[in-house]
Image (spheres, rainbow, N blue to C red):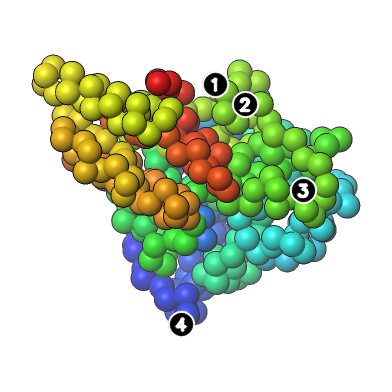
Amino acid sequence: MKTEVIKIDQNNMDTEALERAAAIIRDGGLVAFPTETVYGLGADALSAEASKKIYAAKGRPSDNPLIVHVVEFSDMEKIAQEMPEEAKKLADAFWPGPLTMIVRKNDKVPYETTGGMDTVAVRMPNHPVALELIRRSGGYIAAPSANTSGKPSPTLAEHVAFDMDGRIPMILDGGPVGIGIESTIVDLTEEIPMILRPGYITPKMLEKVIGEVKMDPGIIASDSLQKPKAPGMKYKHYAPKADLILVDGEEEKVVAKINALAKEAVLLGKKVGIIGTDETIDRYPEGEVVSIGARSDEDAIAKHLYKLLRDFDEKEVDIIYSESFATPRIGQAIMNRLLKAAGHQVITV
């Protein structure tokens, strides 16, 4: 299969290209497209066979649920068995945007889309290209991140092409994404709504709208052996080829520990990568040292994370040491992704 990459300007959209992409989805095929979070790999969410193609292209475990993308809140109502009152409040506050809500599904959504579960995850992306593609293709696109399973999520069309060339017919190249980490996922089927994946929409933001929310204990802890209710809960995700080890603690101790580990690894003949910040990169004499941004700029850290991990793949490093990023607002989301990428390898100093 030849993969066609089509550049598309969100401010001046090529309607002919969008219609071609929508036709592929209507016919049961796959199209990668930009959202505000990461690039998605889209198929008809109401087609069991189309959803199966997503799992095959990604090499994704079939019990890992897909997120259904919609353009209207009423579209969500049509695939839900029941609609919790919190859903409308959250949609009014955060849609379109990086929030996914889990509700009980009805028979319109095949189990192939939901990973065999009786619930469905739904969101409305905040990206003109994504919204127009969903609208033209029939209103329901199942779309996980457009990478091979386990690798860092794609924030550029080039990342998608690296992973998906020859596996899918089309990639819509809308340029760099805006946020860079996946949506917050909140489960509304629980008595108290539960966050299953942290993201740009924080617990405090949710609580202002619907009151108390709980955090799933597996978010920062090691992976649960239970069946995942949301993408990314059960499996190692976002991982570069090299081993990634996080070092957590006070800044001085973290820098000293990473330098000691890097020196030891270099002596053993390993090529080392180091993820620091603008404030610390000058203090690492060994290895391929990159800054993820300033600690004061959480949005930049989130936006650069996956690209840095992919860049280390290109540099063919053997091991990566990273500072931890417990920043005030979305630090939990950033650490969630790093912990998944590291397979929960953390050194505390």
Q: CA distance from mark 3 to mark 4?
A: 37 Å
Q: Earlier in the sequence, mark 1 or mark 4?
A: 4
Provide the residue designation for mark 4: 12
The residue under the point 46% across, 23% down is 344
- Which label is found at residue 207? 3
What is the C-alpha distance between the residues marked 3 and 2? 20 Å
Q: Position of residue 230 (x, y in %)?
A: 64, 37
Crowd band around label 4 with a 10 angstrom C-alpha radius: few (<14), some (14–19), many (20+): few
What is the distance, in whole Å, between disc 1 and disc 4 at their CAs? 44 Å
Q: If you read the primary sequence from the N terminus, does the residue marked by circle 3 or circle 2 appear first?
A: 3
Going by the numbered disc 2, the residue's amino acid type is: Gly
Nearer to us in this view, 302 or 156:
302
> Which residue lies under the disc numbered 1?
222
| Residue type at numbered disc 1 | Ser
Mark found first going from the N terminus, 3 or 1: 3
Q: CA distance from mark 2 to mark 1?
A: 6 Å
Q: Earlier in the sequence, mark 3 or mark 4?
A: 4
Q: Are marks 1 and 4 in contact (CB under 8 Å)?
A: no
Residue type beneath disc 4: Asn
Q: Give the image location of residue 286, x and y in percent.
A: 16, 32
For the residues labelled 3 and 1, say whether their Cβ atoms are less than 8 Å apart: no
Residue 272 picture quarter: top left
Whether pointer 2 and pointer 1 mark residues with C-beta atoms closer than 8 Å, the reply is yes
Which quadrant of the figure has residue 267?
Answer: top left
**In whole angstroms, how far apart are the C-alphas of marks 3 and 1?**
26 Å
